[in-house]
Amino acid sequence: MIDKTMSILSQALDGLTAQQSVISSNLANIDTPNYTPQTVDFETALQNEIASTSWAAGSQTAPATAPAADVAMEATDPRHFTSLGSFSGDTSASVTSVAENTRNDNNKVDLETEMTALTETQINYEADSRLIASKFDQLYDVLGGH
């Protein structure tokens, strides 16, 4: 793509698309006995990509001096991120099964959880799409379009 930001936003859209597909599959199987819902873990891959970005000191677009650049977070669960730059593992999105059993027919799909995840995914997708459109508008302006 055009720059690192566009690459990251593009990967985020790909991950959000995969997440929306998995959520739709979970909702379609809400009445299937013994069905275990799936989740997509692309956030770790996206954070790895962001963490691997080498920002040049003094660059106008560099977040090197941002207030939260290297703030360690408290992890209360092994799945929590510990800080922006300390991720490990592969960089591809992975689909995993959810372990909780919430119903008598051994179907583990929770409607409220899936609908919340779907709404969050849609909001994130819209935000990322607007950021990409904004980047293209800036490029168009620079090239003398407006």
Image (cartoon, rainbow, N blue to C red):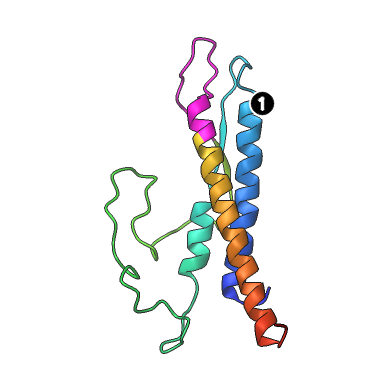
Instruction: Estimate the x, y position of residue 42 in percent, counting from the top left.
Output: 55, 51
Magenta segment main secondary structure: loop
- Residue 77 visible in the displayed image: yes
Q: Residues within 10 Å of mark 1 (few under 14, many from 20)?
A: few
* Any part of residue 98 in sight: no
Residue drawn at x 52%, y 22% as measured from the top left: 108
Q: Quadrant of residue 64?
A: bottom left
At x 65%, y 86%, the residue is 142
Indicate the quadrant containing the N terminus: top left, top right, bottom left or bottom right.
Answer: bottom right
Residue 110: where, in percent of width, then height? Answer: 50, 24
Which of the two residues, 78 or 71, is positioned nearer the viewer here? 71
Image x and y of residue 140, in percent: 69, 80
Of 58 and 34, nearer the camera is 58
Residue behind mark 1: 28
Q: Is residue 108 left or right of residue 72?
A: right
Residue 66 is covered by the magenta coloring: no
Magenta-highlighted residues: 97-115
Q: Residue at x 58, y 46 (%)?
A: 122
What element does badge 1 sit on? helix
Quarter of the image with the C terminus in it: bottom right
Q: Residue 25, relative to residue 124: is it above or below?
A: above
* Number of callouts: 1
